[in-house]
Image: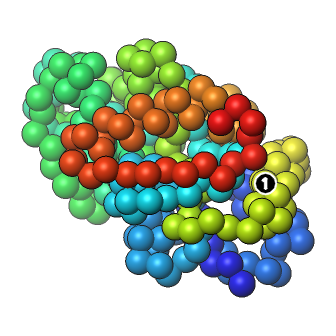
Amino acid sequence: MIKISAVSYLNTKPFIYGIYRSELADLIDLQLDIPSVCAKKLVSGEVDLALMPVGAIPELGEAFLVSDFCIGAVGAVDTVCLFSEVPLNEIEQIYLDFHSRTSVELIKILCKEYWKIQPQFLSAQDNFIENIKGNTAALVIGDKSIGLNKRYNYVYDLAEAWMEYTELPFVFAAWISRRPLPEDFIEKFNAALQSGLDHLPELVKILPTMDGFDVEDYFRRCISYELDEAKWAGLQLFLDKISIQNNKPYNLINQSTLSTL
């Protein structure tokens, strides 16, 4: 039985829906975790496959990309943002959401290379969102970021900023293993993920509704799930930057079936 850790956020629900509808449902051990825990479980060997924040890939040294799908964005993603009461040039401190290494690494790159600011980075604790005031901002990711754009005057979408800076899409999480997985499993796994994406209207009907938030629009407009050639290029650029910055070489081996990669 293959053990899998997947992100528990809303943006992963199409994948989870497809997996539970598929023949793989009884053949795997699927665990739902926050992104940082997905990474820890794969690094420690607790699971065989994880929807892993790509910022943690260098921790593995050698890693295998095993799916045609990812959690990506071509432009604004809406749920990975810097929230502030003041504009960028007045921000002095930024709380960093501890749920995902990827977003933390991304905002550090954007601050240094694109926005040209040098804030103090603070480790976020529970309820850190309440500390967004004055010159103190916060990086907030995932479901808890939904609706915050109505509370703060300045909202900077990290995926949108990356696109403006590099002209490439951004990949937040990808399906990663530490060893090659059987080709027949990968084929069935990709089919399950595609099935979930093909049945979004059905999925939306069984999900809780959120006031002022169109879930299906979020799936279709904000999240881009196919790991295509442009996203692969964006992923490689991001990994190269953080690998050099953290002095951690990596080797990402592609097991995806996409011919463009």
Residue at the image point whose x is 81% and y is 74% from the top: 25
Q: Quadrant of residue 223 in the image?
A: top right
Residue at the image point whose x is 75% and y is 36% from the top: 259
Residue at the image point whose x is 39% and y is 62% from the top: 60
Residue farthest bottom in this picture: 1
Is residue 245 toward the left or the right of residue 146 in the image?
Answer: left
The colour scheme used to paint the residues is: rainbow
Q: Identify the residue position indicated by label 1 in the image.
A: 190
Quarter placement of the C terminus: top right
Between residue 158 and residue 179, name the one nearer to us: 179
Vertical placement of residue 194 versus 98, above or below: above
Whether residue 137 can be seen here: yes
Q: How far across and how far down the image is residue 118, in percent?
A: 11, 29
Between residue 13 and residue 106, name the one nearer to us: 106
Amino acid on which disc 1 is placed: Asn
Is residue 173 toward the left or the right of residue 214 in the image?
Answer: left
Vertical placement of residue 34 versus 82, above or below: below
The tally of labels here is 1
Q: How far across and how far down the image is residue 217, in percent?
A: 71, 33
Residue at the image point whose x is 27% and y is 19% from the top: 114
- SS at mark 1 in the image: helix
Between residue 97 and residue 28, name the one nearer to us: 28
Between residue 163 and residue 182, name the one nearer to us: 182
Instruction: Categorize mark 1 by other alpha carbons within 10 Å: few (<14), some (14-19), many (20+).
Output: some
Is residue 183 toward the left or the right of residue 79 in the image?
Answer: right
Vertical placement of residue 19 versus 165, above or below: below
Q: How far across and how far down the image is residue 238, in percent?
A: 39, 35
Q: How far across and how far down the image is residue 102, in percent?
A: 39, 47
Q: Quadrant of residue 125 in the image?
A: bottom left
